[in-house]
Image (cartoon, rainbow, N blue to C red):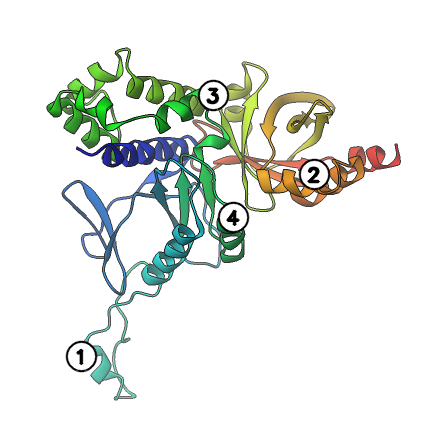
Amino acid sequence: MKVETLKGALLEYLVRNLLKSCGFTTIKSDGLYTFERSGLFFVNGRGAAHDADVLMDPPVQMPFAYPTRIIFECKAYKGEANIAIIRNAVGLRNDINEFEIVTKDSLKKRQNNRRASYAIETRKRYYYQVGVASINNFTKPAVEFAANSKVPLLSLSWFIGRQTIEAYNSLSQNDLDQINPLTLQNLYKFFKDRIGNLNNSDYDSSRSFLSENNKIGDIVTFSNTFINLTYVGLIETGDLIFLYPRQNNVSSILTNTIGFVPLKAEIHYQNNKPNIWLLKVFEGVNLRMEFEFFIPDRIFNHWKQFNLDKNVALDMKEQFFSRIFIFGKNRNREYPFITVNIDQDWLDSARNQ
């Protein structure tokens, strides 16, 4: 097995786990528009059926629109992902969303103004959003094109520790050649499994291997540790932020917060760590939760153009972070997230100071 093949499957596994922690769910094939073959999941398009690396249902849908599904194309490149990858994602999105079955019989019936049925297939339709996930970052042209094309980007380097990213990048063919071929094939099958239950008896050799002291096992363990400790927030720009709780009871607070009543928040930073911000969440006057997070690179680079000016930071908080949706682990499907709004009174007071 080529090392690129296993690294791609490993990246898919990590991205899938991250989405599951945000409340995304695995979909079932309908056998026609979507289907499974040889352990892969395909979505039909105009030109061909496409292998969907990661395909999931989001935890919430928007009204007055077709239900959305998300596909992440996973690119396990050692360097930065470039603009060509984003162009391909846009093409994939168009190909899938513009696909429709029209038969000769339905076309002939259009000639009859009194036709008894519609010339379209009776089925549930979806809008497929296509994003790109990478282990490393993206080039500036790729980020610009993705923003203009409304393609979500996800880099595991944004929240997984540098040591784990370096271990992933350093995986070599020699590392794989030291692994028993049957174990290696079982690992690949496990990483591609959309359910991903390591306790399944089919994956006994994978479970044993990943529990040992080896590079792949360390990558999986450390990555899952970060994913289990991290909460995901969605901000007004559509960017994801990865929230690290500063107290141990965040899980119970998020799980027990019922409904969509927004909580108020303040956002602070320290001059010696300007790219790490602190989100303080209040219920009334009581401080409920505190999270640290790295602000997205493109927003931070925008701020650096103004020499990290405090007034510009306040504008950014109001424009980009005025509302944050936090997806809590183990929340029920009825209330998959909590809403946090920046405290306008606090923001006005900060401006006056």
* Disc 3 to disc 2, C-alpha distance: 29 Å
Q: Which mark is residue 304?
A: 2
Q: Quadrant of the C terminus?
A: top right
- Using residue 317 as the reference point, say whether residue 74 is left or right of it: left
Q: Of the residues tagged 3 and 4, which is closer to the observer?
A: 4
Which residue occupies the foreground of this view, 135 or 241? 135
Q: Of the residues tagged 3 and 2, which is closer to the observer?
A: 2
Q: Earlier in the sequence, mark 3 or mark 4?
A: 4
Q: Which mark is residue 143?
A: 4
Q: Is residue 55 above or below residue 48?
A: above
Circles 4 and 1 in contact, beta carbons < 8 Å: no
* Disc 4 to disc 1, C-alpha distance: 45 Å
Q: Which quadrant holds residue 352?
A: top right
Amino acid bearing label 1 = Asp
* Disc 3 to disc 4, C-alpha distance: 27 Å
* Dot 3 crowding, Cα within 10 Å, few <14, some 14–19, many 20+: some
Image point (23%, 60%), residue name: 48
Image point (67%, 43%), residue name: 302
Q: Earlier in the sequence, mark 3 or mark 2?
A: 3
Q: Which mark is residue 105?
A: 1
Question: Residue reaching furthest top?
Answer: 213
Q: Secondary structure at mark 2?
A: helix
- Using residue 238 as the reference point, say whether residue 113 is left or right of it: left
Q: Earlier in the sequence, mark 1 or mark 3?
A: 1
Q: Quadrant of the N terminus?
A: top left
Q: Is residue 216 above or below residue 264?
A: above
Place of residue 249 in the rendered image (x, y in percent of width and height, measured from the top left):
54, 15
Q: Which mark is residue 229?
A: 3
Circles 3 and 4 in contact, beta carbons < 8 Å: no
- Using residue 310 as the reference point, say whether residue 9 is left or right of it: left
Place of residue 36 in the rendered image (x, y in percent of width and height, measured from the top left):
18, 46
